Image (spheres, rainbow, N blue to C red):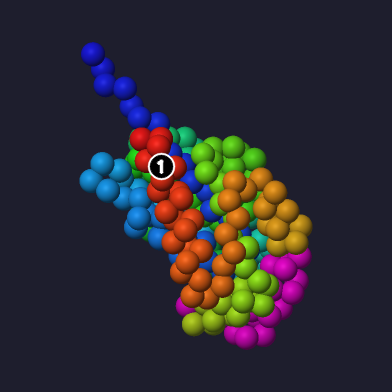
Amino acid sequence: MREKKIPVYFIIIAGGTASGKTTLAKKIAELAATNKTSVRYWSMDNYYKDFAEMSLEERKKINFDHPNSLDIQLLVEHINKFKNREAIEVPIYDFTIFSRSNKTLILEPADVIILDGILALHIPEIRNHGDLKLFIKTADDIRFIRRLQRDVHERGRTLENVINQYLTTVKPMHDLFVEPSIDVADLIVPYYEGNEVAMDLVATKAKAIIEENN
């Protein structure tokens, strides 16, 4: 008799830019992974469209905080492959050139998939796959400071560029798309730097839910 596959448990983590999504995802993965349960962390950051046909200056003007900047079709295709326990080939986005690099990453399937992204709960084609939907609620000033530090030190941006992008696209798109998606979350996580208690509580809750479904 053919062995029945256990359904893949899909966790979605949303929240504003630099809100702590990756930190929470890694904490859940750390607590939930056991000898019996495999966990895979995955980010929407690599699913921006290529825009390779555009010049660098043109790509710099793209509103990357709008849903139209994402390759939703490819992301949904990969979600379905993961749910069917198939490996996926993830594009790697290079934020220094605002385009995909020529490298990809092979991710093997797992019992639990954790996907994070600022628009993960806004886009129906994505959020409808979520068995557990989380939203990290982080103060705007904290998020801006964290984004500023990241973009300057890791992505080669200037102070002026980061501030201009935040005011012209990041903040308006957050208010329009990201923040309203909190209404569809199953759990809301209050976050600030060093808030290990909230992180541990949510990760432990996620682990308990995962164990109930495996």
Q: Is residue 147 above or below residue 181?
A: below
Q: Quadrant of residue 103?
A: bottom left
In the rendering, at what x and y percent does residue 178 appear?
Answer: 68, 57
Asked whether residue 8 appears in the rendered view, the answer is no
Residue at 40% over, 48% down: 207
In the rendering, at what x and y percent does residue 81 appear?
Answer: 42, 36
Between 85 and 57, the one nearer to me in the picture = 85
In the rendered structure, does residue 6 fall within the stretch colored magenta?
A: no
- At numbered mark 1, what does the secondary structure look like: helix, strand or loop? helix
In the rendered structure, does residue 168 fall within the stretch colored magenta?
A: yes
Between 164 and 197, the one nearer to me in the picture = 197
Q: Magenta residues: mostly which secondary structure?
A: helix
* Mark 1 neighbour class, 10 Å CA radius: few under 14, some 14 to 19, many 20 or more: many
Q: How many marks?
A: 1
Q: Is residue 4 above or below residue 89?
A: above
In the rendering, at what x and y percent does residue 160 appear?
Answer: 67, 85
Judge left or right: residue 207 versus residue 1.
right
Asked whether residue 202 appears in the rendered view, the answer is yes
Q: Quadrant of the N terminus?
A: top left
The residues colored magenta run 154-172
Q: Amino acid at mark 1?
A: Ile
In the rendering, at what x and y percent does residue 181 appear?
Answer: 68, 51
Residue at 71% over, 62% down: 174
Judge left or right: residue 72 versus residue 78.
right
Q: Which residue carries the number 1 mark?
A: 210
